[in-house]
Amino acid sequence: MTIQPAKLSDPAVRAFVTAVNAHDRDGFLSLLTENATMSDDGSDRELTEWVDREIFSSNGHMDVDNESQGGRALLAHYRNDTWGEMRTRWSFTVDDDGRISRFETGQA
């Protein structure tokens, strides 16, 4: 059973999932700190290039199955036009100002 984005516990993570699913690139980038970093399957990636390729140019979409660690860790079915659908894990580091300074994703 999926968790509706509006019901996710952490406000920053809730906004992240909402922006991904709405294909709102500007809104998405506004959620991140200036020097935010990310990794995919354990390898650090260039964030802007990755989100453009894996989310915004390929119609990325997250259906969250489970959350833990106060809403900062997710299990989700992620799909895009490039890779189809896969079960993924996501974890988030949220700074005191409520913006995301790092996210990590990969196959679950």
Image (spheres, grey):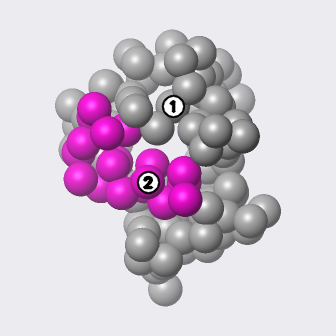
Q: Residues within 10 Å of mark 1 (few under 14, many from 20)?
A: many
Drawn side of residue 77 relative to residue 27, left or right: right
* Residue projecting furthest to the right: 69
Dot 2 corresponds to which residue? 15
Residue sticking out furthest to the bottom: 1
Q: Which of the marked residues, 1 or 2, is nearer the chain's N terminus? A: 2
Say whether residue 99 is left or right of residue 72: left
Q: Which residues are magenta?
A: 11-28
For residue 88, say whether it is visible.
no
Q: Position of residue 88 (x, y in %)?
A: 56, 53
The residue identified by callout 1 is 32
Residue type pointed to by label 2:
Ala
**How far is mark 1 from mark 2, CA to CA?**
11 Å
Residue at horizontal 56 percent and vertical 26 percent from the top: 33
Badge 1 amino acid: Leu
Instruction: Based on the picture, tell me whether residue 27 belongs to the magenta stretch.
Output: yes
Q: Name the secondary structure under disc 1.
A: strand
Residue 51 visible in this rendered orientation of the protein: yes
Q: Which mark is residue 108?
A: none
| Position in image of residue 57 (x %, y %) | 21, 31
Residue at 45% across / 49% down in the picture? 16
Q: Main secondary structure of the magenta part?
A: helix
| Near-viewer residue (35 or 4) | 35
The residue nearer to you, when weighing 7 against 49, is: 7
